[in-house]
Amino acid sequence: MGVELHTAGASSDWMTDPAPLRKACGVLRVGLRQAEDGQTSVVDLFQQGCLKARLPRPQRAGEADLVVLNIAGGLTGGDHLSIEVAVAAGARATVTTPGCERAYRSAAGVARIDQCLRVDDGGRLDWLPQEMILYERSRTRRRLDVELQGCAEISIVESVLLGRAAMGERLTHGCFSDFWKIRRDERLIYADATRIDDSFGQTVACPTALGGQAAMTSLVHVGSDLVVKRNALRAAFAACGGIRAGASVVGEVLVARIVAPGGRELRRALVAAVESLRHPRPIPRLWFC
């Protein structure tokens, strides 16, 4: 396993330098493969800047658990995160985060997040970060590119909380864009684009958008038995009150959406959905810390 760590040197005049505010940048590249004993292990790791990876003890034999940390403490205008995860044939991995990511108010520019996931034939990846919280006047652009080979499987969950509910915050201005592409054997099988821009509050309140809901999740699964999994998701959603949710099979992809008044209702439905997809594998421990 090769590990490269790069730390930028600190300037002695950082407190008085009149130049524009420093921006947080992070790069993380991780490669995983299946060893001869059936265990999944990291064979390539590059981390730079504010992005770090941790490998806690896996919850199931034969799988790897990876935790992605942004030690900058959040995102603001001009920040840039780049994450690449490659899962080789036969390997099994779950990626999550230690807590909610925060997109703070942006004084200038846009915070960018570029995520590239690759799963080879026979591999499986569960991409399960915890929610992102958008603050008032935050500006965030996220892009997710997925490359699958052969019968690779992947589950992707991305959740967004619109404002800090505990403080009574409701977003009225800001920008959030989210663009996904999934390809199997270089063939596009799924694409999705979301954009909410000023005036943010008016867009969110629109009945054809979120209908005033303050939390949302997009869930996508590519794998086998999609109809069975769709029915399990629908049953899980029906048992959760206070949300609006649905699941459909679109071509080779299972797609589910959840919108809820706040993070608590969203998390309850999200846990039920992920449990139904991962059964009998458990939810990542960090989701309950």
Image (cartoon, grey):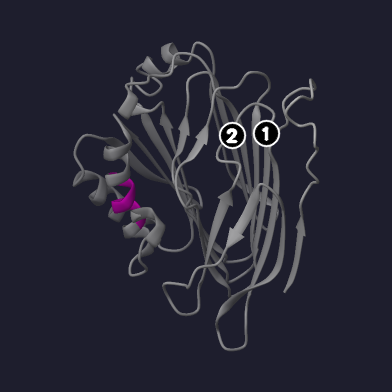
247 left or right of 24? left
Picture coordinates of residue 63, whole percent (x, y): 50, 73
Give the residue at x 59% y 29%. Answer: 140
Query: From this viewpoint, which residue is outermost toward the bottom?
Result: 37
Q: Three-letter amino acid code at disc 2?
A: Leu
Query: Which residue position is annotated with label 1?
Result: 79
Q: Label 1, label 2: how many angstroms apart (C-alpha)?
A: 6 Å
Residue 201, which numbered label? Answer: none
Q: Is 8 placed above or below 104 here? A: below
Mark 1, residues whose alpha carbon is within 10 Å: few (<14), some, or many (≥20)? many
Quadrant containing the C terminus is bottom left
Quadrant containing the N terminus is bottom right
Q: Three-letter amino acid code at disc 1?
A: Asp
> In front: 101, or 239?
101
In the rendered image, is residue 271 in sight?
yes
Helix, strand or loop for the magenta stretch, by majority: helix
Q: Is 209 placed above or below 49 here? A: above
Q: SS for tag 2?
A: loop
Q: What stretch of residues is rendered in magenta?
A: 269-274
Q: Quadrant of residue 205?
A: top left
Give the residue at x 76% y 24%. Answer: 16
Picture coordinates of residue 103, whole percent (x, y): 53, 31
Give the residue at x 76% y 51%. Answer: 7
Was residue 193 drawn as part of the magenta stretch in this picture?
A: no
Give the residue at x 49% y 52%. Answer: 97
Q: In which quarter of the image is residue 224?
A: bottom left
Q: Is 63 placed above or below 78 here? A: below
Q: SS for tag 1?
A: loop
Q: Do the residues labelled 1 and 2 touch (CB within 8 Å)?
A: yes
Picture coordinates of residue 221, whole percent (x, y): 47, 53
Query: Which residue position is annotated with label 2?
Result: 75
